[in-house]
Amino acid sequence: MKQVHRSFLFHSWPRFAVRHPWRVLAGTAAIVAVLGALSIRYGSAFSDSMSLPRSEAQLAAEVLKTRFPQSSGDAATVVIEARGGLADADIRSRVLKLMDELRALPEVVNVTSPYDQPGTISADGAVARLSVQYDTRTPGIQTASVQALADLRQRETGPDFTVEVGGQVIRKVERPHFGSTELIGVLSAAAILLVAFGSVVAMGLPILTALLAVGSGLLLIAVGARFFTMPSFTPQFGAMIGLGVGIDYALLIVTRFREGLAEGMSVENAVTTAAATAGRSVLFAGSTVVIAMLGLWLVGISFVAYVGTAAAVVVAMAIAVALLVLPAVLSLVGGRIDRLRVPGLNAPVRQSESGFGFRLARTIQRYPVPAAAVSLSILVLMAVPLFSLRLGSSDAGNSPTTFTSRRAYDLLTQGFGPGFNGSIQVVVRIDSPDAVSGVQLLADAVTQMPGVASTSAPRFNADRSAAIIQVTPMTSPQAKETTALVHRLRALAKQTTKGSSASAYVGGTTAAFIDISDTIDGNLPYFFAAVIGLSVLLLMTVFRSVVIAVTAALMNLLAIGASFGVIVAVFQWGWFGGVLDIRGGPIESFLPMFLFAVLFGLSMDYEVFLVTRIHEEYLRSGDNSEAVARGLSVTTRLITAAAAIMVAVFLSFALGDSRTIKEFGIGLAAAIFVDATLIRLLLVPAAMQLMGDLNWWLPPVLDRLLPRFHVEPQSELDLVPVHVIVADSE
């Protein structure tokens, strides 16, 4: 006798959850409570300070920290607009009073006076800028200290005396509003689910489980923010990805559960069958997203890796809730899954094998070349703007006008020019008194450089072992001319100090973001190759086919190219800028990596859903054309609903304040839309029809080397959630 064991996750656990649902839900509630307590006790704020170890900007910061500690902290720029002119006696009195109040703020070590610093009052005398120096970098400044600065700005602003605050420091409390866009996304998803299921109860289950997954994931991320520096957009990015995948994964399982009930199964068998079929797809698809996001560690930039890890945590929670908690909820709902039907929404329970999807497949099979040509032409046209892609870092000029940092940016541009929003620091480390005289020579050379608006006189520390030269460019921080200027300054600094006992580093916030962009540019090819190679390997393992794996990777690249084209047109060229409240500017340098990782994982979902069913039909019939037609017919409605939900969720985030999140939302929505329509419904069936039986070719050597992993059960016995005793063949 021999025993056939069923897996714990897909058989034993679902049966336990069905028989003991309240225990499962009580355990879930306890875990969430613990996460909530940890978040309250150890949770921390997020920070937009992004450093890159061993970069030149970081070396400059380290020199300031050790030899110029009074200037090693970050500074906020307070901008004043006085309609009566800064020379007016009453205005001067108000400015001096404001300076005294700024000096009294916590953690402030110095405030410069516009009346003592040349070049800090505009030519027309209406705009002045003050530097408020803190004793540490932005991540180390207490949020309450920055809030005190924001409150002071609000109190002092009047009809004829405007006070605004710019710089990285104020962004510590100037966060995009969290909650409204997420609510719009949830409501949009609920409407689509209602149409897909036709039942309020069935609609509510994916929403409920997705919110549970996102909430739990965000609690964990809040704890992680205490130990790791994560950008302020991390929670919104995690919520966006978590809502999309969480609802989709639950949608797949609930759909299979309803099918089981419609076939006459008991609630217990319907739950365990859904777990053994759809649950496997969820685990595989979700794992690819998690692996892709963790692959961001290959880039070598800590804050990029932390954001990727945060998103991976939320996706992992979505998988866990779908596989561990949803079976218990389904057992309690049982046959009431289709209660509270909406009149007029008679959504079918079973997938149709003769409806729109089947007719579409047959049409494509009759005209595969035109179908492939049309879909490819549209994708290539959408990707055309990609060839003018310019990566960089957007500045405060791209923020909403409701932010004080944006208004400060506009005032500085109005009074002094755009370059005053992103001054560059040349930090000189002096190791011998003989090198002191060379600092002035360097400052003189910098002043003569094209693109430099002004240069401050060198400022030395007490023992003259370090000096700072402030350089104001003629162009804004995000302009490509400013990037070129930073590179020229670095070349000049190295040339001027060569052979001396001094070292010069070009730093500051503007230079730090340029360092990050340069590092990402250098590592992107390796990251792309790793993600593409992994996806091809996984698909070959699952479907035992070289052709399907390679064509899937190529089609994913087409979808990503189309989405990048949309991003360039909207955010770099400024299309629909008035509607979205954005200005044209560079695309965030880290965006391509995140989008590439997320989209390769999400595209794998639809590839698995579609090709798994086609493969199943091919194994049954041996007829490639029939398998493609039947596979497409029974997955069209599911893929369309899942994609519509993701598009709605992602687009809702484009309504928020954060430019970065807008870029993510529109890029992801565009990619999912073309992936679920042009690619999965047109290009994939056309390509598979043209390839014929070659779709399922795998060299014998690869067949032996690749491990075997089945997304779907391989026989009816695989659906039996118990230990089965059978007689030995002996």
Image (cartoon, helix red, strand yellow):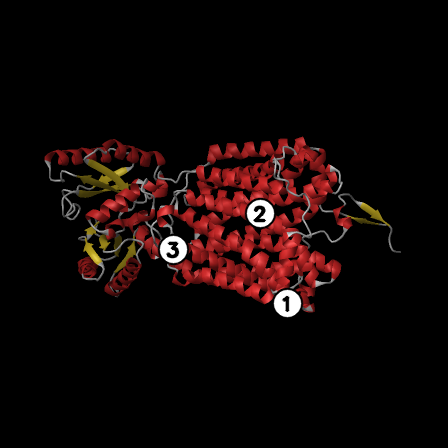
When the figure is inspected, residue 587 is found, relative to residue 25, above or below; the finding is below
Question: Label 1 sits on what residue type?
Answer: Met
Earlier residue among tags 3 and 1: 3
User: Label 2's element?
Assistant: helix
- Determine which of the numbered discs, if any, sits on residue 642 in the image: 2
Within 10 Å of disc 3 (Cα), the crowding (few <14, some 14-19, many 20+) is many
Residue labelled with disc 3? 516
The residues bearing labels 1 and 2 have C-alpha atoms spaced at a distance of: 27 Å
Three-letter code for the amino acid on which mark 2 is drawn? Ala
On the image, the x and y values in percent for residue 585 come to 34, 54
Left or right placement of residue 93 versus residue 612 in this view: left
Q: Residue furthest right?
A: 730
Mark 1, Cα crowd under 10 Å, few <14 / some 14-19 / many 20+, is some
The residue closer to the viewer here, 644 or 9, is: 644
SS label for mark 1: helix
The dot on residue 112 is none
N-term-proximal mark, 3 vs 2: 3
Near-viewer residue (252 or 292)? 252
- The quadrant in which the C terminus is found is bottom right
Instruction: Kindly identify which residue carries mark 1.
Output: 691
Rendered view: 389 above or below 652: below
* Residue 109 place in picture, x, y as percent: 25, 39
Q: Residue at x 52, y 52 (%)?
A: 672
Question: Residue shown at 18%/33% (left/top)?
Answer: 97
Q: Is residue 690 left or right of residue 650?
A: right
Task: Give the CA separation, mark 3 to mark 1.
Answer: 44 Å
In the image, taking residue 618 as reference, residue 147 lies left or right, namely: left
Amino acid type, callout 3: Ile
List x then y, in percent, for residue 393. Answer: 36, 53
